[in-house]
Image (cartoon, helix red, strand yellow):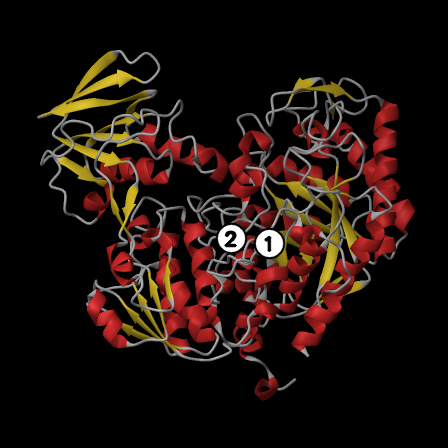
Amino acid sequence: MTENNKKPGEIAYPHLFSPLRINSITVRNRLMQTAHAKGFHSGSGLTNNRDIYYQAERAKGGIGLIVTGARHTHPNSTGPNRSLARGNRPEIIERDAEMVRAVHAFGGHIIAQIIHFGPQGRSGALDDYRELWGPSTMKSPAYNEWAREMTREQMREVSEYFAQTALNSKAAGFDGVELHYSHGYLHQQFLSFVYNKRTDEYGGTLDNIVRFPIETMQAVRDAVGPDFVVGIRISMDECTVGGMKADTAIEMTCKLVETGLIDYVSATAGTYAAHADQIPPGDYAEDWLVEDGARLRKAVQAIRDIPVFIVGHIVDPKKAEALVADGAADMIAMTRTQIADPAFANKLLEGREDEINHCIRCNQACIARLMAGNAISCVVNPAAGREQRFGSHTVEPARAPGRWLVVGGGPAGMRAALELATRGHAVELVEASERLGGQVNLAAMLPRRHKFGFIPRDLQRQLHKAGVNVRLNTRLSADDIVAHDADGVIIATGSTPLKSGFTSTRPAVDQVPGMQQANVFSVVEVLEGKAPLGRRVVLFDEDGGRYALGTAEYLLDRGHEVHLVSRFTALSPNLALTLDLPVNYRHVFGKGLRYTLNSWVRRIEGGTAQLFNLFTDQDEARLQADSFVIAAGHRANDTLYQQLLGRVERLYCIGDARLPRPLQDSLYEAMLAGRELLDDPNRFIEQGELEGFDLQWQETLITRVS
């Protein structure tokens, strides 16, 4: 192919867009999506439409390789709930075959990851009770349940089940299987001196701890034959005190490679004792695993010429290109990147980088939803996990293109305007301030939250490209909007922070005395630089997340003494779901944060806050401070909407202006408004609606694409 015939991405990223041979398959490029639990299987444990459309969307978007979420291989393998597929059940073959066909139809390859959860499941996760197994009798760091030391017969049985699950995967047409030997699941615990305390031939030395994983590899290879891809996923670093680090992990992995039984190694990090290291939030440095990954690849290549895949907060395509070019890795995992934008690969290839929706690494709508028992989605891509209803094939041109006015340039207003313009409407977006983005700009000011800035930057580029007329520093009255005579109006005027001191744990008190003092400020006032704070600050946390704790650290970084008072039973408990709790604890504790839990403020008098215990209602400490900051919710700015009711025929109110909620709620609502579905009585996705299996994907996807 001559330079003139190459696509822009092939010129800018020649190594990233080169093919890769893995045993009997050739993958079209070096971009992959690693296995990640999605919570799509709560009904039957079987592949369904939700899987098929999710994977097809990413294959259509140009990805090279997809690895499915982990699939149970054995009846005693249980997860946190009923959200994972049961790969050992023969009924799954027919359904998997449709998912594979969908991925292949768009030129992608797909590998099934197979697993035994071992101690990291819950005995009562299913509709009966199942004993947990592990290398040694121990308690799980995941759910604090006891696991029983496996017998040799049970180990043999598990290996046989892995082999049968691999055969099921082969029968379905998968391009290979990946054995999950990382993240603290059964086989990784055998590979861990922290958890493997056996004194027989399966514990004590490197040669012994690899024995059971090799037996499983052998059983799988014997079952599927030499030409079927078999890979392993390993943790290069357990990320725990006394855990295995990269040097030992590389030596251990080489023993697995020396068997000749596997066709690739996928490298990751973390266990359930270091959960955040498995799915790092934005607090982690970019590319934090790549140096160890490069050493692993060098060691593997010295034994056998098989590819090594790497993860580790790799988000910059230029860095990904360099890693492949330098021989540091053969395949680059950009998993959440392609949850946020399924067409990421094609946009790179076609020179449309200005259209990419960047992952902000917030973990709010992906892993946090999963940990709450829901299916994953994405803050910046509301269609994620809902592709059957809202995937790219569902975007319909407007039946009657018209003129729309969007008032408010925060993320909700921007997203709604983009959806409208994409569908063919002429759109004007009016923002009262000097820049777009609203309060997301303030979120991006908090420590290690700079990636939130991707939202307004991405949307602003796309609005310009879509031809949206953006007017800044423009404030419209209700009469102005009526006079505009638009065919439709969307109000997205945001919200105002509350300073009443109200807490849901003491709802009878609407207003805490003293909250109107001149030395009491909202988080927004602090971040906007409108709060003349003294050195000593007391911050009241009714939020339980980064809104409060991030502000506390923001103040600590600027030399303030901060005492956080929380109505919660733990410090910022909501961060447990988004996995950024440990890293934020390390930062704020290291910077000297003081805090009081289970308490609230009864009143503020001058420079004194009287605290009381929420469980006893007894007065406790009196805190002295120069300034007080309240993180206790927002009130909708819906005055303009109320004034327009009955005066504008097509009127929507979205985002915080409708009701202050998490960002993912607002952007989902904006998508609906931009598709003119917000007032559609059929817009709700009923429970289980996306988990059917109807073989309609070919008609729905292929026909519409062609």
> Would residue 508 appear left or right of 6 to someone viewing this image?
left
Q: Secondary structure at mark 1?
A: loop
Rendered image: mark on residue 545: none
Q: Position of residue 622 (x, y in %)?
A: 18, 17
Considering only vertical position in the picture, is 285 above or below 453? above
> Would residue 590 appear left or right of 156 to someone viewing this image?
left
Mark 2, other Cα within 10 Å: few <14 / some 14–19 / many ≥20: many
Instruction: Examine the rendering and report whether any part of residue 81 can be seen.
Output: yes
Q: Position of residue 340 (x, y in %)?
A: 52, 58
Q: Residue type at mark 1? A: Gly
> Do the residues bearing badges 2 and 1 touch, measured as CB atoms within 8 Å?
yes
> Would residue 576 appear left or right of 310 to someone viewing this image?
left
Considering only vertical position in the picture, is 652 above or below 170? below
Q: Residue at x 75, y 58 (%)?
A: 99
Q: Residue at x 25, y 44 (%)?
A: 497
Q: Secondary structure at mark 2?
A: loop
Q: Residue type at mark 2? A: Cys
Residue denoted by label 1: 385
Tell which of 149 and 359 is nearer to you. Answer: 359
> Would residue 484 appear left or right of 622 to someone viewing this image?
right
Q: Position of residue 702 (x, y in %)?
A: 71, 73
Instruction: Examine the rendering and report whether any part of residue 307 can be seen.
Output: no
Q: Quadrant of the C terminus?
A: bottom right
Considering only vertical position in the picture, is 28 above or below 617? below
Residue denoted by label 2: 378
